[in-house]
Image: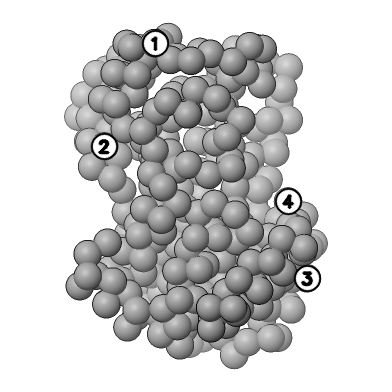
Amino acid sequence: MNQKLEQLFQKKVQGKIALITGASSGIGLTVAKKLAAAGAHVLLVSRTEETLKEVQAEIQAEGGQADIFPCDLNDMDAIDEVSKQIIASVDHIDILINNSCRSIRRAVHESVDRFHDFERTMQLNYFGAVRLVLNILPQMMVRKDGQIINISSIGVLANATRFSAYVASKAALDAFSRCLSAEVHSHKIAITSVYMPLVRTPMIAPTKIYKYVPTLSPEQAADLVAYAIVKRPKKVATNLGRLASITYSIAPGINNKLMSIGFNLFPSSTASVGEPQKLNLVQRAYARLFPGEHW
């Protein structure tokens, strides 16, 4: 992020209250630290209390302000309860970042006896995020101010193969966000979707081939979120994400062909079929041609 944008970001978030889910690792952790370093009061939500305490201690050691709220975001009742705790603990929430998610890399034909994969991804990625929004939104509407940022995926724009469960859950949240955006526009609430490419986080670690493909660092991903906070756009995407969206809009057959080549070029996850594989030169070249895409 360039110096001017960094300065605008610090000015934008100084003294603000930001709620981040999935804040104990990866993108959520890095975003939380970036916000706290810029002067925001961060509210950290994740499943494991012990890990959250470690993150809180790190932020406080650097002079930041952080409170933690352990919660299993698969549990709707738990979300309702933690929402009450959060609302009771702060005057208001300026920014909600729905980052917590579950990703499953498995082709549809490998999932015919795994319907629970689709249920689990929808439960966390869609229903959990929506439930939290429903609890936090009324306060924003009363204040006529706020921003909700949903961490989506480049796969929604590119129709990533092997990620049907994951992409469908993110696409559902995307559609919800577009509808909500129009409804709260007059209340000066911004709804932003950030279409993240692959980011080198613990979530992608089980897929061994991702050691050999281009990814963003968590810091680069956090910069995309910072941009979203400063500019408050409807969506944030990389150049490849925008190209994929345009291609599918005007020439879906080309998009389908390119994704099909990638599907046949790359192996299924080792969690699905067994032995890990390194990428050959052709696979590496194709991955570099489409940096950040989910293969």
Residue 28, x across and y down, in percent:
54, 58
**Is 12 placed above or below 79 here?**
below
Name the residue tied to disc 4: 74
Q: Are marks 3 and 2 in contact (CB under 8 Å)?
A: no
Which class describes the residues within 10 Å of circle 2: few (<14), some (14-19), or many (20+)?
some
Residue 147, x across and y down, in percent:
43, 71
Which class describes the residues within 10 Å of circle 4: few (<14), some (14-19), or many (20+)?
many
Going by the numbered disc 1, the residue's amino acid type is Asn
**Is 207 placed above or below 204 here?**
above
- From the image, state whether disc 3 or disc 2 is nearer to you: 2
Disc 4/disc 2 C-alpha distance (Å): 31 Å
- From the image, state whether disc 1 or disc 3 is nearer to you: 1
Q: Splitting the image into 4 quarters, where does residue 268 fall?
A: top right
Residue at the spot 55% in from the left edge and 36% down from the top edge? 204
Disc 2/disc 1 C-alpha distance (Å): 23 Å
Name the residue tied to disc 1: 280
Q: Which mark is residue 240?
A: 2
Task: Indicate left or right for 180 with 10 as reference.
Answer: right
Q: Secondary structure at mark 4?
A: loop
Name the residue tied to disc 3: 81
Q: Splitting the image into 4 quarters, where does residue 136 fall?
A: bottom right
In the foreground, 253 or 44: 44
Q: Are marks 4 and 2 in contact (CB under 8 Å)?
A: no
